[in-house]
Amino acid sequence: MRLFHFSDDPAIALFEPRPVRVPSMRPAGREWLNGPLVWAIDEAHDFMYLFPRECPRILVWATVLSTEHDRLAWLGRWRAAAYVERRWLERLEAQSIYRYDMPPEEFEDVDDAGMWIARNPVIPLGRLGLSQLDRQFVPRGVDLRVVESLKPLKDLWNTSLHASGIRLRNASDWN
C-alpha cells in the first residue's frame, strides 16, 4: 500500500502533527481528528488532492451501497468524478504541487475516504513534483468536470454515491 501527502511546499523534510486549520464537525468520540495529526491519503483516493491547495472541489465515487442508477447517472464509465469551478481551471493547468511518499507503517486508517493519520512526526520517503494537474485525472479513471458553479451539485450528498467537498468555503457561491 502507498500513502501520500500533497503540498505546494517542495521542501518538507519532516511532517509535524498539527491541528486542522478549519475544524470539521466530527461524530461523537472522533473530535480528536481535528487535533494535531499528520494526514495522508491512500493511492486509490489521491485524485482528491491533485489541486492547488485552496481550490474548491467536489469529488464523487461509487461505494458498495451505491445504486446502479446513481453510478450510471453521475459517473458513467468513470471510476470517479472531480468537479471544479471554471475560474480555477487556469491555476489547475499552471500550478505545480508535490506528492510526498509517506511510510505506511507510521499511519493508522481512519476508515474514511482513504484517509490515514499519524500522531507523531513523520519523515517522508520521497517527493515527486506534479504539473499540468488537469492531465493527472484520466490516467486514474477520474473525469475532471469543469462547471461554472459547484452550488448546483449540493444534491450529490442526497445520492447513494460518496461525495466529498474540499475547500468549499472558497467556492464562488457555495453559502
Image (cartoon, helix red, strand yellow):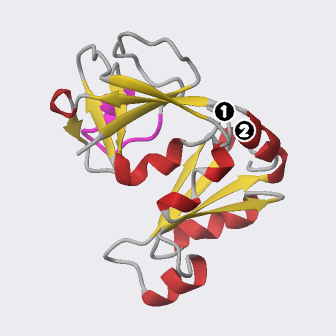
Evaluate whether residue 163 shows in this view: no
CB atoms at circles 2 and 1 under 8 Å apart?
Answer: yes
Residue depicted at x 34% and y 16%: 17
- The secondary element bearing badge 1 is classed as loop
Give the magenta-colored segment's residue range: 24-34
The circle on residue 30 is none
The answer to whether residue 151 is above or below residue 40 is below
Residue 126 image point, x, y percent: 36, 23
- The secondary element bearing badge 2 is classed as helix
User: According to the image, label 1 marks what residue?
Assistant: 54
User: According to the image, label 2 marks what residue?
Assistant: 170
Residue 157 image point, x, y percent: 54, 66
Q: CA distance from mark 2 to mark 1?
A: 7 Å
Name the image quarter holding the N terminus: top left
Q: Residues within 10 Å of mark 1 (few under 14, many from 20)?
A: few
Which residue is nearer to you in this view: 56 or 48? 48
- Residue 29 magenta-drawn? yes
The numbered mark, 2 or 1, whose residue comes first in the sequence reads 1
Residue depicted at x 52% and y 23%: 21
Residue 11 image point, x, y percent: 49, 11
